[in-house]
C-alpha cells in the first residue's frame, strides 16, 4: 500500500487557518485595523460596503512596506513583529501571529497598495484565494491601503452563514470602537456605503468617548486611576445614576487590547453593587497596563481572552479603584428603588396572600373531612371549561381520581357546593412571586413571571402573524434618539414592531417619533422598553440565532412580563392561570424555564410523616 499522508497545499492550509481567525467581516476589520495601528499610522480610515460582505477597505498612513515585504506579508506565519519564542513574552504590538493577511487573502479577492515614506514608487498586489494575480509597481500615498472584496467568495458555507447586514455592521462597529477607544492619538473614520458613521479626531480619552457616545456623556463620566506595582489602571466609570437598564458600554483594555474578562467584570460589578439596583448595569472604560510578561494573550486566535498571572490582585485593585472613584466624587445613590424591579426591596411578610385560604374557610370547616380535598364539579368555572383538558393533561390523575371517587362513594361523602366555592377560589400568592393553587392531584405552584412571559409571548407571536395588535396612540408622541447601530436595528425591525402595535416614524439622524405603543406597554417608559428590547434582541440574535419574530416576541414578553415582587389580586391570578393553560406550552417559559411545579398528595403526606 502506498504512503498516503501528504502536506496540504498552502492555499488549503490558509483557508483552514482563516476559519479560526476570520469568522465574519468584522474579524477582517479587526485584523486590518490592528495592522494599521501596529504600522504606526495616525490616521486610519475604514470603508465598508454591504456590511463588509462586498468590500472592506482600510487606509492608513503608517510605515508602509517594501516591495519584498509586501509580497511576504501574505505568507503564513510571516510577521515583522516577533522573531523568536522569547518575544512572545514581551508583546507590545497588537498582532504577532502572522496569520491575518494570509488568512484574509485565502478567502477573498484582495488588493494591497503600499509605499514606505522613503520610497518613490509603491507596490500593488492583487490576490484571489491565495493566488497572486498581479504584482506591480504603482504610485500610491505613503502608507498602506488594503481592499478586501467579496469575503468568503470561495467558502460559500461561510458566506451563507453570515447574518443580516445590520447585524454584521454592528459587529464591525464594535470592533472599530474597541480600537478607537484605545488609540486616541490616532484619527479614525468609519464609513459604510458612503455614509460616515464616525469621524474621530485625535483627542484625549474623555473627548473620544464623548465623540463616540454623544455630548451627554460628558457629565456622566468619573475618572478612575490607580498605580500599583502589578498594574497601572486608568479610565472612566459611568456615574451610577446613569447606569442603564441594559448592559451598556463595558470595556476592559489590557496593554491597548480589548479583552473579555468575566472575572474582572465581576470585580467592577461588585464595587458598584451596593449603590446600584439589581438590574442596572454600570458603564466603564477601564485601561490596564501591565508587564507583558505577566499576561498570556496567546490563548485564543482572536486574542480577546487573556490570562493574568496576578488575577486575584488585579481583581482587588480594580475593585478598590472603582470604589475610590465613586467615593471621591461623592456619589450617592440617586436612584429610585422601584419595588417592582426586584424582590430584594420588598418588605417581607407584606405580600402574604390576600386570598389566604386559611382565612376564608367557613367556621365549621373541618380539614379532616375527606370531601374537602375531593375534585369538584364546581371547578367547572368558565375558566376551567375552556382549559379543562389542559389541566387534565398536565396531571396524570386517572388513577388517583378513580381511587378518590371510590373512596368518596364508600365514605358516603359528597361535595357540598358552598364549600367547594371557597376551595375553588383558593388561589394565593406567595413571596410576591409564586401563585399557589390546587389541582385534582395536589398543589400547584406557578412562577408568575414566567407564566406571564409565556402568555405574552404567544400573544405577540399571534399578533404578528395575524396583524391584529392593538395599539394605543400616545397623547404626546415621543421623540427618541438612538446610537447609530441601534437605529439601524430599529429600521430593520420597523415592520414587525408595527405589527406589535408600535407606531414609529423616522425623523432622520437616528431620531424617531413614537406615536403609538402596544396596549400591553401603556404606562411603561418607552425609551427604556425599546432599549431593553434592542438589548435582548441583540443578545438572542447572538446566542440563539432566532428569526426576527420569535426573537422580538421573546424580548417583548421578557420585558413586559410582571416582575417578581408584583402583588397580584386573585382575579388577576385567575386570569393569568386561565391564559396560561390555553397557551401553547403552559409548562415552559419562552426562555426555556419551568413554569409549574407540583406537589402531589403523596408528597404532602410524606411531609407530615
Ligand atoms: P501580524 O500582524 O501578526 O504580524 P499579519 O498577517 O497581520 O500578521 O501581517 C503580516 C505582516 O505584514 C506584519 O507583521 C507587518 O509587517 C505587515 N503589515 C501588515 N499590514 C500592514 C500595514 N497596514 N502597514 C505596514 N505593514 C503591514
Ligand atoms: Mg496583524
Image: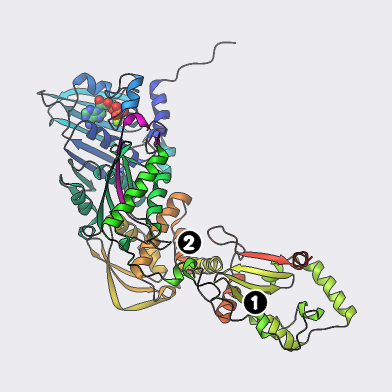
Q: Which residue is mark 2?
A: 554
Q: Which residue is mark 1?
A: 386
Closest to the camera, between mark 2 and mark 1, is 2
Q: Position of residue 231 (x, y in %)?
A: 31, 38
**The quadrant where residue 46 appears:** top left
| Dot 1 beta carbon under 8 Å from ligand 2 | no
Q: Give the secondary structure at mark 2.
A: helix
Image color mode:
rainbow
* Location of the C terminus (image quadrant): bottom right
* Location of the N terminus (image quadrant): top right
In depth, the one of 301 and 282 nearer the eye is 282
Q: Position of residue 229 (x, y in %)?
A: 31, 36
Identify the residue at horizontal 40%, vertical 57% (top origin). 273
Q: Is residue 469 above or below residue 94?
A: below
Mark 2 or mark 1: name the one nearer the start of the chain: 1
**The quadrant where residue 257 appears:** top left
Q: Residues within 10 Å of mark 2 (few under 14, many from 20)?
A: many
Q: Position of residue 19 (x, y in %)?
A: 42, 33
Identify the residue at horizontal 53%, vertical 67% (top origin). 449
Q: Is residue 37 above or below residue 498?
A: above
Give the side of residue 217 with respect to residue 466, left or right.
left
In depth, the one of 508 and 330 nearer the eye is 330
Give the side of residue 269 with respect to residue 407, left or right.
left
The residue range painted magenta reads 282-308
Task: Check residue 239 for magenta coloring.
Answer: no
Q: Taking the image as four quarters, which one is ligand 1 found in?
A: top left
Identify the residue at horizontal 87%, vertical 75% (top origin). 406
In depth, the one of 590 and 97 nearer the eye is 97
Give the side of residue 92 with respect to residue 599, left or right.
left
Amino acid at each position: 500500500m502506498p504512503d498516503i499522508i501528504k502536506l496540504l497545499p498552502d492555499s488549503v492550509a490558509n483557508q483552514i487557518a482563516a476559519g479560526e481567525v476570520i469568522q465574519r467581516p468584522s474579524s477582517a476589520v479587526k485584523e486590518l485595523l490592528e495592522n494599521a495601528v501596529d504600522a504606526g499610522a495616525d490616521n486610519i480610515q475604514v470603508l465598508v460596503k454591504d456590511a463588509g460582505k462586498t468590500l472592506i477597505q482600510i487606509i492608513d498612513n503608517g510605515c508602509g512596506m517594501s516591495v519584498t515585504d509586501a509580497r511576504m506579508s501574505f505568507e503564513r506565519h510571516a510577521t515583522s513583529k516577533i522573531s523568536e519564542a522569547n518575544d512572545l513574552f514581551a508583546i507590545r504590538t497588537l498582532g504577532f501571529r502572522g496569520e491575518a493577511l494570509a488568512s484574509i487573502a485565502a478567502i477573498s479577492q484582495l488588493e494591497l497598495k503600499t509605499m514606505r515614506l522613503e520610497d518613490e514608487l509603491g507596490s500593488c498586489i492583487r490576490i484571489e484565494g491565495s493566488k497572486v494575480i498581479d504584482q506591480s509597481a504603482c504610485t500610491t500615498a505613503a502608507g498602506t491601503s488594503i481592499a478586501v472584496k467579496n469575503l468568503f467568495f470561495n467558502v460559500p458555507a461561510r458566506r451563507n452563514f453570515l447574518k443580516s447586514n445590520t447585524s454584521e455592521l454592528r459587529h464591525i462597529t464594535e470592533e472599530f470602537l474597541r480600537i478607537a477607544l484605545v488609540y486616541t492619538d490616532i484619527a479614525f473614520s468609519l464609513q459604510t456605503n458612503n455614509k460616515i458613521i464616525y469621524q474621530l479626531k485625535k483627542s484625549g480619552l474623555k473627548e473620544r468617548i464623548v465623540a463616540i457616545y454623544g455630548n451627554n456623556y460628558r457629565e456622566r463620566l468619573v475618572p478612575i486611576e490607580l498605580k500599583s506595582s502589578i498594574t497601572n489602571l486608568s479610565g472612566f466609570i459611568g456615574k451610577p445614576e446613569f447606569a442603564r437598564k441594559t448592559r451598556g458600554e463595558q470595556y476592559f483594555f489590557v496593554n491597548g487590547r480589548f479583552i473579555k474578562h468575566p472575572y474582572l467584570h465581576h470585580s467592577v460589578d461588585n464595587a458598584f453593587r451596593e449603590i446600584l439596583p439589581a438590574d442596572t448595569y454600570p458603564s466603564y472604560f477601564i485601561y490596564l497596563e501591565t508587564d507583558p510578561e505577566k499576561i498570556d494573550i496567546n490563548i485564543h486566535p482572536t486574542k480577546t481572552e487573556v490570562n493574568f498571572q496576578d488575577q486575584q490582585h488585579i481583581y482587588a485593585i480594580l475593585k478598590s479603584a472603582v470604589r475610590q472613584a465613586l467615593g471621591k466624587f461623592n456619589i450617592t445613590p440617586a436612584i429610585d428603588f422601584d419595588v417592582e424591579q426586584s424582590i430584594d426591596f420588598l418588605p417581607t411578610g407584606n405580600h402574604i396572600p390576600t386570598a389566604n385560604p386559611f382565612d376564608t374557610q367557613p367556621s365549621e370547616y373541618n380539614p379532616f373531612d375527606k370531601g374537602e380535598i375531593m375534585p369538584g364539579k364546581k371547578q367547572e368555572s368558565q375558566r376551567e371549561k375552556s382549559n379543562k383538558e389542559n389541566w387534565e393533561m398536565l396531571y396524570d390523575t386517572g388513577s388517583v381520581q378513580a381511587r378518590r371517587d371510590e373512596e368518596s362513594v364508600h365514605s358516603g361523602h359528597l361535595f357540598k357546593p358552598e364549600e367547594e366555592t371557597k376551595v375553588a377560589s383558593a388561589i394565593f400568592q406567595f413571596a410576591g412571586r409564586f401563585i399557589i393553587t390546587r389541582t385534582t392531584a395536589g398543589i400547584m405552584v406557578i412562577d408568575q413571571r414566567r407564566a406571564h412571559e409565556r402568555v405574552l409571548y404567544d400573544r405577540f407571536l399571534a399578533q404578528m402573524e395575524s396583524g391584529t395588535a392593538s395599539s394605543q396612540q400616545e397623547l404626546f408622541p415621543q421623540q427618541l434618539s438612538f446610537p447609530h447601530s441601534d437605529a439601524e436595528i430599529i429600521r430593520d425591525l420597523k415592520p414587525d414592531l408595527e405589527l406589535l402595535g408600535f407606531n414609529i416614524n423616522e425623523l432622520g439622524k437616528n431620531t424617531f417619533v413614537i406615536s403609538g405603543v402596544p396596549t400591553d406597554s401603556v404606562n411603561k417608559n418607552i425609551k427604556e422598553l425599546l432599549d431593553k428590547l434592542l438589548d435582548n434582541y441583540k443578545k438572542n440574535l447572538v446566542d440563539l440565532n432566532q428569526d426576527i419574530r420569535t426573537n422580538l416576541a421573546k424580548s417583548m414578553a421578557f420585558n413586559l412580563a410582571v416582575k417578581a415582587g408584583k402583588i397580584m389580586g386573585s382575579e388577576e391570578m385567575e386570569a393569568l392561570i386561565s391564559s396560561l393553560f390555553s397557551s401553547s406550552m403552559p409548562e415552559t417559559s419562552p426562555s426555556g424555564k419551568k413554569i409549574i411545579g407540583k406537589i402531589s398528595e403523596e408528597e404532602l403526606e410524606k411531609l407530615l410523616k
